[in-house]
Image: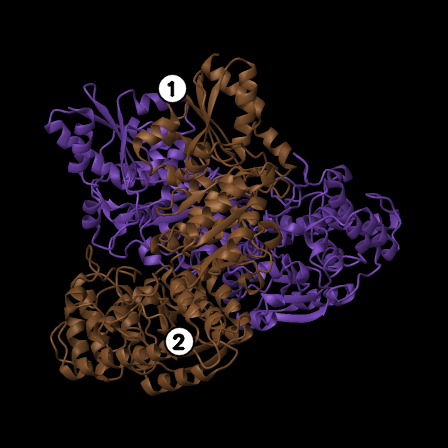
Chain colours: A brown, B purple
Amino acid sequence: MASLSSIRIEHGEASRDPRASALRALAMDAVQQANSGHPGAPMGMAEMAVALWGSHLKHNPANPGWIDRDRFVLSNGHASMLLYALLHLTGYDLPVEELKRFRQLHSRTPGHPERGITPGVETTTGPLGQGITNAVGMALAEKRLAVEFNRPGHTVIDHHTYVFLGDGCLMEGISQEAISLAGVWQLDKLVALYDDNGISIDGPVQGWFRDDTPARFRACGWDVIGPLDGHDIGAVEAAIAQARRGRGKPTLIVCRTTIGAGSPGRAGTARAHGEPLGADEIAATREALGWFHPPFELPDDARAAWDARQPGEQAEARWQARFDAYRAAHPELAAELQRRMAGTLPTDWDALRAAVVDHEAARADDVATRKASQQVLAQLAPELPEMFGGSADLTGSNLTDFPDAGARHLSYGVREFGMAAVMNGMALHGGFIPYGGTFLTFSDYSRNAIRMAALMKLRVIHVFTHDSIGLGEDGPTHQSVEHAASLRLIPNLAVWRPCDPAETAVAWTEALAAATQPSALLLSRQALPTQARSAEQVAAIARGGYVLVEDDAAQATVLATGSEVGLAMRARQLLAERGVPVRVVSIPGSTRFDRQDRAYREQVLGALPRFGVEAGVTAWWGQYGCVAALGVDSFGESAPAADVFAHFGLTPQALADRIQETLGA
Amino acid sequence: MASLSSIRIEHGEASRDPRASALRALAMDAVQQANSGHPGAPMGMAEMAVALWGSHLKHNPANPGWIDRDRFVLSNGHASMLLYALLHLTGYDLPVEELKRFRQLHSRTPGHPERGITPGVETTTGPLGQGITNAVGMALAEKRLAVEFNRPGHTVIDHHTYVFLGDGCLMEGISQEAISLAGVWQLDKLVALYDDNGISIDGPVQGWFRDDTPARFRACGWDVIGPLDGHDIGAVEAAIAQARRGRGKPTLIVCRTTIGAGSPGRAGTARAHGEPLGADEIAATREALGWFHPPFELPDDARAAWDARQPGEQAEARWQARFDAYRAAHPELAAELQRRMAGTLPTDWDALRAAVVDHEAARADDVATRKASQQVLAQLAPELPEMFGGSADLTGSNLTDFPDAGARHLSYGVREFGMAAVMNGMALHGGFIPYGGTFLTFSDYSRNAIRMAALMKLRVIHVFTHDSIGLGEDGPTHQSVEHAASLRLIPNLAVWRPCDPAETAVAWTEALAAATQPSALLLSRQALPTQARSAEQVAAIARGGYVLVEDDAAQATVLATGSEVGLAMRARQLLAERGVPVRVVSIPGSTRFDRQDRAYREQVLGALPRFGVEAGVTAWWGQYGCVAALGVDSFGESAPAADVFAHFGLTPQALADRIQETLGA
């Protein structure tokens, strides 16, 4: 391996354009200062960045929130110093002091770009392949919003989404899901620039990556420009201009580059990828570039050439004039667009929420919670036009659609990971609250995108149906056992496992109201008994856990979630007949419950011996101090659901026996 | 959505070949009997199956373990009844009674094919895209074994790997990783037959899947035959024959088929996919096929035409004669091949294991556990030629290579999921113990393949380095926080998080010895203090948890794993100075420890107040009854590792303070 990474790949040479040299210098100096990071990609993409950010990108450094700005995604997020240099140089609120604190605690320049930390960073990237997929979601959002809000003579949504990506993104499978969807959706305002440098961490990619990438993209409905010399600023500028004229297809521009271009000793080698150049090589690079300014210092002409504040202000002013005219002609649309982009719920939200919850709480029929979810959707979606649904080819099973959904419900195909990362992109763009369905087990496929949503604080809602062994005949490959417990471990992810329509309604409304948090709704395939509740109990559902049945004579507390709440209630009945009264606590949202004050939690959980029941791994109950737990600590079985529950001893009888036995009652 | 799924796609018509009719009848009747399952795909692929299984597949129903058999993978696993029908008809130990018990508890015919349940099922499929990737691993194993073991005049390893797959597999991103690798590796004995029926669950695929699939495969180095009429047995037979003659490239055969072919009312519709046809439609189908035999009954000529027992026996006998000649000429090679395929470790394994563990236990220098892992590999790999390593483009970081690894270490490119599923395929084929590396955080990408290995009981070893916030500057996208706890929830997955070379050596040797279990080794980026141990303590490591420091005067027990064992030891020192002695327990392998007898566990955990420390989510400690736990319950931070540990209060001082405070000591 070591020998491979020392092989040099030659594609092209660094320009001496001062704008490009400024990027290279900042990147290599910041990495050196941090003694950590990736100089090779920023140096290799310097001219691509000049071409895009210097000539095409529509943005206003003074207002990173301008809704009609172009979106830029650095899918190869390890090239973060390129983006920080661009943001600094074009005039965002990112002073040079922050560049000097690259990769230091609480700086605005973390190792990989993080949304919310750095003004101008549109999405958090690093886990490869997801940035390009986020970009597909952004471009989809732009396209849908334009259809919804533009009017004849009034074009207020009209921007491009640009992506830089490397071969790492293209090796990741999710990129195939992304490019396939972008092709189907004809996202012609999506322009991807491929940093084709022939090098990945293990060395020249020929040993593990020989795809004909242009042919692959063409096969998926893309226009492809190039390969061209990625160090030729004019060539890249022209290619972007051509891509912007394209109609009906997204465009890939293949830019042949040299990783670490400008560094005499490291250019074209894997060593350039992930280690500082070192003082000597930095000096040699300065020499080679004819760039003799000290670290972090730039000549005025380079600064002036990069400064985008004035053109940015003018660009937004032109748009603002158009928007003012639009508002004059269509005041309600304009207000609605602003509301949607701000991510605030409609003013009547509280009333809507209460109405939906009350409506579901009043139901008496027993339905599957996936069906309850669809009932809730049918009430919420018409009132919340920002809700944008979909399913990874399981619409009829996930029940994610709603009456007259039309273009507001998408079939993503069998692409769980892609769906999740596209939804992240839509949420990042703004204007939508995306939700999407698949079976809970396949949350494994999308897991890292769920994590990224949690890290980025995005309001994205995952509808995971068929949430346990209750799925039945499809068997262990499709039966989630560890997934509920495992999702609850992801920081800032709200996980709801409701037991009936009332809890499902609360789960949905809480998910919609959680503006800085993704949510996962774990829903049953099978019908579940609907529980009776007082108004106080209905109100308590939103606390994540509450007493469903209190009993002053109780000898134990049964904690249950989702489909096992009904089981616990039936066990309670059996135990009552045996003279062993128990309380029952429902915990539909443990991630919410765990954040309640201690007094409330202790009151709910109670001081009696606790028994947990959930059709999944029992280790999870440890944190609630259960003396025993019923669950499933192995993989499932293929059989009708009732048989599987019986096989695993998840029956009212078994639970009652276990409690009685443990209590010695 | 509903309207889409009723649109009919016309490609071709069912033949009246009695072998095909037998498959269709068994599939629709078994699904009907179960009142659950997928009739459409088996009926659509009936002629493809006749072409492959009737004319090409080299197998012996009496010996599903014949090492030189062709491998057949049903990547679209929901078509399980096709495979069960084939196994039954060709003569495997799968009587018709089992077909009648399709999808019933403890039948040999679960909803999706499961390895180990049904003789002749080569891999468990259902989660789409993984079957084709397993097949790539099988074909890779065949190719490598052939190079290793065949000798001039003696060809003992020479078989094909065939795959059936559908559009669902092709939509999943992992398929891109698979086909890209198959192209790079030039797996010319891999033949994939694409059931191109234009329908997925949500309806005709044109709304979400418009890839030019032949062009996509060609772009990745495949030969492509077709599209051809997948109901034309002769055409498919000829295509397979052509594919078998191919050199240097894997082959895709595009078979245009009609889902549910043979069913007058359901053929070509999404309804055919996942619901029983119903009695009336089954009758109509019998009429249309001219097949008037009762359910599960077959005419003698169809049975005879399918019976593969005699040709299978002859095929294996011919191979056996070749193998006997090989054994005569190369007795040691023959024995070694048989050992490798049986999956037994070398006879000197116990001595080797002991030597490696003792060697590492004797070390005194402080190294990262990823480095300790490489030290262990350097000792084990030369003695275990079945070990087959790799990394998802992080070789120099994961340190998965070993001296003179040569072709025994692969760069998989940035394809974590693909790597994991390829490794599963290699393990399924036999002859190898695959292991592969990436950062722990990216276990998210490969998670479902890890789960599948656990479900299939495969000896596959995941080397997950950079296992916590100790990764440092790369920041929260790369810092695992919930991953250790989350992997431990997967049934039958061994998870090891060693603290130094001795524990790392035990983790590796236990992983290698676990023939029916995958293992995940969670290793640090940063150097960790090496601990001193008695021989008894070294022996106890394999129990997964043990007392590292006993203290009769102790006031508390500190439980720690991996990089936090050293932290616990330093806290112990501080506490000793403050007059608060504590015991320290190391739990490198909680999944192992949890299976020890109760007495041992209680002795190790002790009756004193317990404090847990691990640089990850603290909820995990609940099951060990800890009174307090130090960890990280939010996402990480980008900064040098020491700064991140300090930021999260994971220091000896903080732990000592917390213990002292809680004890009131």
Q: Position of residue A120 (x, y in %)?
A: 29, 68
Q: Chain of mark 2?
A: A
Q: Does residue A124 appear left or right of residue A580 in this picture? A: left
Check disc 2 and report the residue beneath it.
A328
Residue B475 seen from this side = yes
Specify few, some or many for label 2: CA neighbours under 10 Å numbering under 14, 14-19, or 20 or more. few
Give the residue displayed 65% in from the left and 63% down from the top.
B194
Give the residue displayed 18% in from the left and 31% down from the top.
B572
Q: Amino acid at mark 1?
A: Ala
Identify which residue, B12 or B452, lies in the foreground: B12
Q: Position of residue A272 (x, y in %)?
A: 27, 69
The residue tagged with tag 1: helix, strand or loop? helix
Specify few, some or many for label 1: CA neighbours under 10 Å numbering under 14, 14-19, or 20 or more. few
In this rendering, is residue A649 above or below B346?
A: above
Identify which residue, A140 or B427, lies in the foreground: A140
In this rendering, is residue A359 above or below A227?
A: above
Identify which residue, B375 or A478, lies in the foreground: A478
Give the residue displayed 56% in from the left and 21% down from the top.
A573
Q: Position of residue B524 (x, y in %)?
A: 29, 47
Check disc 1 and report the residue beneath it.
B599
Give the residue displayed 64% in from the left and 48% down from the top.
B324
The residue tagged with tag 2: helix, strand or loop? helix
Q: Amino acid at mark 2?
A: Ala
Q: Position of residue B468 (x, y in %)?
A: 30, 47
In this rendering, is residue A260 above or below B35?
A: below
Q: CA distance from mark 1 to mark 2?
A: 78 Å
| Tag shown at residue B389 | none
Q: Chain of mark 1?
A: B
Q: Does residue B382 appear left or right of residue A378 in this picture? A: left
In this rendering, is residue A502 above or below B49?
A: above
Res B415 → quadrant: bottom left
